[in-house]
Amino acid sequence: MALTESLIAGIILGKGDYKLIGAYVTSPLNWAVITGTNTKYKAITDLKGQKMGISRPGL
């Protein structure tokens, strides 16, 4: 999971090694769930029971 701003900027700049598959928290800071482009995970529900890493802890 990560904040979306830098990820969207990377997509705009042509970085194709990840994709956004869902929103995790919608608040003033939008968090997204990101996977590699060549993955079996297509939706956030596909991650149920899986371990995830975060870019930084929340408040």
Image (cartoon, rainbow, N blue to C red):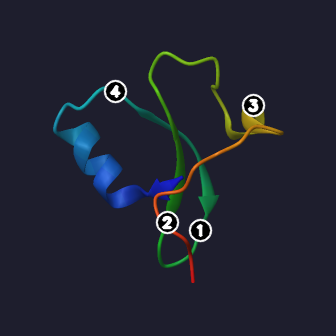
Q: CA distance from mark 2 to mark 1?
A: 5 Å
Mark 2 surroundings within 10 Å by alpha-carbon count, few (fewer than 14), some (14 through 19), many (20 or more): few
Rendered residue at 63%/26% (across/down): 42
Q: Between marks 3 and 1, how big is the CA–CA gap?
A: 19 Å
User: Dot 3, how many residues are within 10 Å of its Cα: few (below 14), some (14-19), or many (20+)?
Assistant: few
Please say if the residues under marks 2 and 1 sit with CB atoms less than 8 Å apart. Answer: yes
Q: Nearer the viewer, mark 4 or mark 2?
A: 4
Q: Which mark is nearer the camera, 3 or 1?
A: 3
Marks 3 and 1 close (CB-CB < 8 Å) = no
The vertical placement of 8 against 13, above or below, is below
Task: Give the labeled residue for mark 2.
Answer: 30
Task: Measure the C-alpha gap from mark 4 to mark 1.
Answer: 24 Å
Q: Residue 40 in the image: x percent, y percent?
A: 63, 17
Q: Which residue bears the numbered disc 3?
A: 46
At x 33%, y 59%, the residue is: 5
Residue 26 is labelled as: 1
Q: Nearer the viewer, residue 27 or 57?
A: 57
Identity of the residue furthest to the bottom in this view: 59
- Give the mark nearer the N terminus: 4 vs 2: 4
Q: Tag 1's secondary structure?
A: loop
